[in-house]
Amino acid sequence: MPEAPEPTQVKQTAPSLPAARTSAYLIEGPSLANRVARGSLIFLAVVVAAGLIVVVLPQSTVERMIHALQATKAADLPPDKIALLYLGDELKGKEFHIRGILRNISSEPLQKLDATVRLYSTDNTLLETVVVRMDQDVIPADATAEFHLSYPNFMGQFGTYSVDFKWRGGELVPYKDRRGTKYLK
C-alpha cells in the first residue's frame, strides 16, 4: 500500500500588525500641552525681541514709524466735514437744556444735518435717543450752526448724555472735537 503523506504542521504565530500601524504606536509625538507651551514661548520671544528693538531704536525713528502708520490709517478715513466747537448743559428751573455749536469745516455747504442726543441713566443704561434739528437747514462753508434740546420737568431722569451727528438719511457724520482748542490769529 502506498504510504500516506505526512500531515504538515501549521506553525501558529502571533498576528502581526501592518508596518504603518506599528510605527505609529512606537513613536509618540509631543503632547498638546507641550505644543501649546512651545507656541507660547515662541510668541513671547517675538514680543520680547520687538520690545528690545523699540528700546534700542532712536526715538526719532520710532516717531517716524508711528507717523507713517498713522498717515496710512488716516488716508483710509473720509475727511471730516464738521467740528464740534461747544457742548454744554444747564438747569433752568425744572428744564434741562443741552446746547451745542458746530462749524462746517468742508469747502461746500452742508444740508439736512441733525444732532443725535443719547440720554443715559446713572448706571450708563441708554434711556432715550432724541434727534435734534440744527438751527439752519443749510450750513454754508466755514459757518457755524447750533442745536438746542430742552428737557422739561427734569427730575434727574438721566445722569449723562452723548452727542453724535447724522444726515437726515440716517448716515453718521464723523466730526472733529475742537472744544477747548484755542486758535491764535
Image (tube, helix red, strand yellow):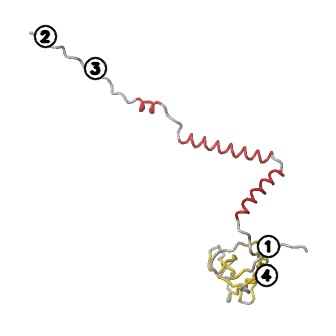
Task: Check residue 178 in the rendering and tell me which mark sits there, or answer none.
Answer: 1
Amino acid type indicated by mark 1: Arg
Front residue of 128/112: it is 112
Which quadrant holds the N terminus?
Answer: top left
Q: Horizontally, is 63 left or right of 44 in the view?
A: right
Amino acid type indicated by mark 4: Thr
> In terms of image quadrants, where is residue 87?
bottom right
**Residue 123: horizontal and vertical position, in percent?**
64, 73
Q: Which residue is mark 4?
A: 144
CB atoms at circles 3 and 4 under 8 Å apart?
no
Q: Residue at x 76, y 71 (%)?
A: 176
Considering only order in the chain, which callout, 3 or 1, is on the residue closer to the N terminus?
3
Residue most toward the right?
185
Considering only order in the chain, which callout, 1 or 4, is on the residue closer to the N terminus?
4
Residue 127 appears in the figure: yes
Q: Residue at x 45, y 33 (%)?
A: 24
CB atoms at circles 3 and 2 under 8 Å apart?
no
Circle 4 crowding by C-alpha within 10 Å: few under 14, some 14–19, many from 20: some
Task: Check residue 3 in the rendering and tell me which mark sits there, or answer none.
Answer: 2
Q: Residue at x 73, y 59 (%)?
A: 72
CB atoms at circles 1 and 2 under 8 Å apart?
no
Residue 160 appears in the figure: no
Considering only order in the chain, which callout, 2 or 4, is on the residue closer to the N terminus?
2
Q: Horizontally, is 48 left or right of 14 in the view?
A: right
Front residue of 148/175: it is 175
Considering only order in the chain, which callout, 4 or 3, is on the residue closer to the N terminus?
3
**Residue 86: horizontal and vertical position, in percent?**
78, 78
Q: Which residue is mark 3?
A: 11
Residue most toward the front?
108
Give the mark toward the camera: 4 or 1. 4
Q: Secondary structure at mark 3?
A: loop
Circle 3 crowding by C-alpha within 10 Å: few under 14, some 14–19, many from 20: few
